Image (cartoon, rainbow, N blue to C red):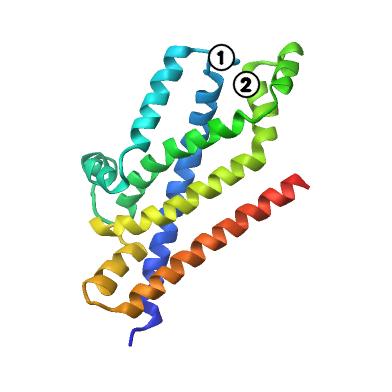
Amino acid sequence: MFEISLFIEPLWQTIYMVFFSSLLAMLFGIPLGVVLFITRPHHILSHEKIHRLMNMLVSGLRSIPFIILMIALIPFTRFLVGTSIGTTAAIVPLAVCAIPFLGKVVESVLSEVSSGLIEAAQSMGASTMQIILKVLLPEALPGLIQGVTLTVINLIAYSAMAGTIGGGGLGDLAIRYGYQRFDTQVMLLTIVILILLVQFTQFLGDLFVKRLRR
């Protein structure tokens, strides 16, 4: 038999990793998505070379499997936080993985904003920043929340993978106890907790979207 206290620290480690990597993803991913959108050909700050270069970088990062990305970023992680092992260190590859993902989601969501609204704002003399802050982002807010929700859900899954290189959290618990010690109960309960985290995140995201749309 196992004690429920066995899960408390790994659960908080997972929440810690996901929370801060999500913050970094929003801090950098949303502006990235905005830049990808406005630099598209025939848009408000059209610049084909910048758009193409950024799109290639984003697509390149998104195509790297997360487990390989974690290993490749070990020197960069060690440079930033002083170590490549532990919960704080795992935030670096999680954020690097989430930023381009959220950026593409934001670009896609912004493309659904009516071009008529953008043209109307331009005809009234609105600056690029005013169009972004007062037209694009407010109009796309429900979609942006859904994009952030999807990003957080992906980060929950990726945080479990971080346990394979000493990142801590529920993934590390599942490997050390569930897999290496053949403890099926620990493995099953870890899966249940991860499912509940995902469902709770989806519930919150849907709740915010419904309130905004009302």
Side (left or right) of 7 relative to 48 = left
Pointer 1 residue:
45
Vertical arrangement, residue 113 with respect to residue 91, above or below: above
For label 2, the crowd category at 10 Å Cα-Cα, with few meaning under 14, some 14 to 19 and many 20 or more, is: few
- Circle 2 is placed at which residue position? 129
The relative height of residue 108 versus residue 159 in the rendered view (above or below) is above
Q: Amino acid at mark 1?
A: Leu
Q: Quadrant of the N terminus?
A: bottom left
Task: Between residue 168 and residue 199, name the one nearer to us.
Answer: 199
Q: Residue at x 54, y 62 (%)?
A: 199
Is residue 133 found left or right of 50 in the rendered image? Answer: right
Question: Quarter-wise, where is residue 120 in the image?
Answer: top right
Give the label, 2 or 1, closer to the camera. Answer: 1
- What is the three-letter code of the residue carrying label 2? Met
In-image side of 15 versus 1 (left or right): right
The residues tagged by marks 2 and 1 sit, at their Cα atoms, a distance apart of 11 Å
